[in-house]
Amino acid sequence: MKPFSILTCLLLPLFIFSQQCDCKSNFNWLKKTFEENDAGYAYALQKKGVDLYEAHNRDISKKVSDVESLQECQAILYEWLTFFRPGHIGIRLLESATQTSGNESPVNSYPDWETYSFVSEDFKAYLDQKEDPGLEGIWETSSYTIGIKKEGESYIGFIVESGAPTWSEGQVKLKLQVSGDEGSGVFYMYDHSPVEFDKVGLLGKNYLELGGFSLNRRYPELPKDPRIEEYFKSMYASLPYLEQTGESTLYLRIPSFQGTQKKAIDSVISANREKILSTENLIIDIRNGTGGSDSSYEELLPFLYTNPIREVGVEFLSTKLNNQRMLDFINKPEYGFDETVKKWAQESFEKLTRREGEFVSLKDNPVSVIEHDTVYPYPKNVGIIMNEGNGSTDEQFLLAAKQSKKVKLFGTSTIGVLDVSNMYMVPSPCGQFELGYSLSRSMRIPDFTIDEHGIQPDFYMDSGIAEYEWVSYAESILKGE
């Protein structure tokens, strides 16, 4: 599972609490629920110390006392959670907590927002006069068309076309400050909340990267670099695919290991099985993954296999609330589990219930050993490309894959969110928030931890290697060039 981003939660509108469900009461619920049920709570306390935790609680308690909006409260509650770890935690607003402001349209709720006056044809004529427009131009995201124009030493980004009801033509969507190779700025989200970033740069001539945001140039039309086009195709792919990059190399892009993607992953592997088994090099690109389900990568492991793969298991913290998830697996149709899984869930529930208050392994052996009866000669070399956007199930896949003599890891360190996992979502008594916390901890703790430092690559992709060159770089290493 991929950890929640606070930015996702900031997309929601601003609302005022009722006195019965203020931020303080929500914080008290959050704190009690997390302390009693989260599998990583005691471990974090042991590492950081009680004194530091109590100081953190005092700081948060002061902040929640004067909060008047759900949005601000959500941010403070998330801040409290980050004391424990960077991932497998979350706090989000429930849809039932949102309200509308009378008959006022979303755009009208920002009547005093800064605007930039422009005439579309005049702006295009201005751009046509530039030999090299640089950052200036008309750019696209999934929901907006944004004009960017230099004003003095700064850049103003304004709405040209909007697909969101909260934004209208001419409103200022972003601001940039650029000096030499350094840049920073602010991007305003759906609800006009600011997200600051300290990275501004062009990738080729047609892509603009602003921190975690990417914009595609719409005007003026400039020559395209095929390598960069291929890079963005892979990074924004929603489904897995395989293609041949050279006579001896295949490229497999897997955007996500979510359980819903398993069928698509298995289908690509099945359709290309003979090609994979007859090609010397295989590159698997999992950059910016979403985490998900271990079952999603099961069909990949036979192609990587050279020797038994050892997987260290987890222990579940047994509490009445935590054990409810096993009943959810049985009774909630949205999980879609078959009778075999439901039977396992019932047996697990009974085992956990008998040992409330303890950490319980649901397997007889803390270490599982994966063995296959065949070691395929091809692929002879396997390179897996990863980055800081990979965590959770992505990291579990890497731990399994790197035990193969065929496999080398390329990229940067992963985020490090695997030691405490198996998230569970529970609603607050007021029905305003949903808390995400973790039910299990790895039995690798404390000898071999992943959290906070991640999994390291065998070949580090330093800043001198552009991200769109990572695949070709990995291919050259696998081919021994």
Image (tube, rainbow, N blue to C red):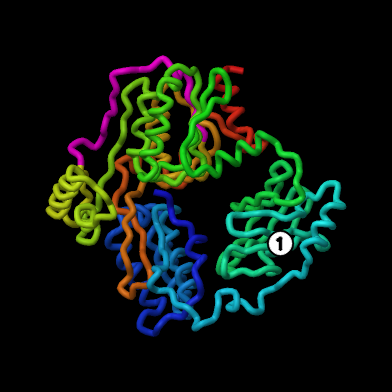
| Residue 456 visible, this angle | no
- Disc 1 marks which residue? 157
The total of numbered circles placed on residues is 1
Magenta segment includes 315: no
The magenta segment is 363-385
Locate the C terminus and report the quarter of the image it occupies.
Answer: top right
Q: Residue at x 38, y 30 (%)?
A: 300
Q: In the image, 300: left or right of 334? A: right
Q: Residue at x 44, y 46 (%)?
A: 290
Magenta segment includes 375: yes
Mark 1 packing: few (<14 Cα in 10 Å), some, or many (20+)?
A: many
Q: In the image, 431: left or right of 363? A: right
Residue 409, image x and y in percent? 50, 30
Q: Nearer the viewer, residue 477 or 40?
A: 477
Examine the residues drawn in magenta and state their main secondary structure. loop
Q: In the image, 422: left or right of 109? A: left
Residue 204, image x and y in percent? 71, 41
Q: Residue at x 83, y 47 (%)?
A: 132
Q: Give the vertical position of 86 relative to 272 (above or below).
A: below
Residue 50, image x and y in percent? 37, 61
Q: Give the vertical position of 192 relative to 313 (above or below).
A: below
Q: Give the vertical position of 376 relative to 44 (above or below).
A: above
Residue 396, image x and y in percent? 38, 38
Q: Amino acid at mark 1?
A: Gly
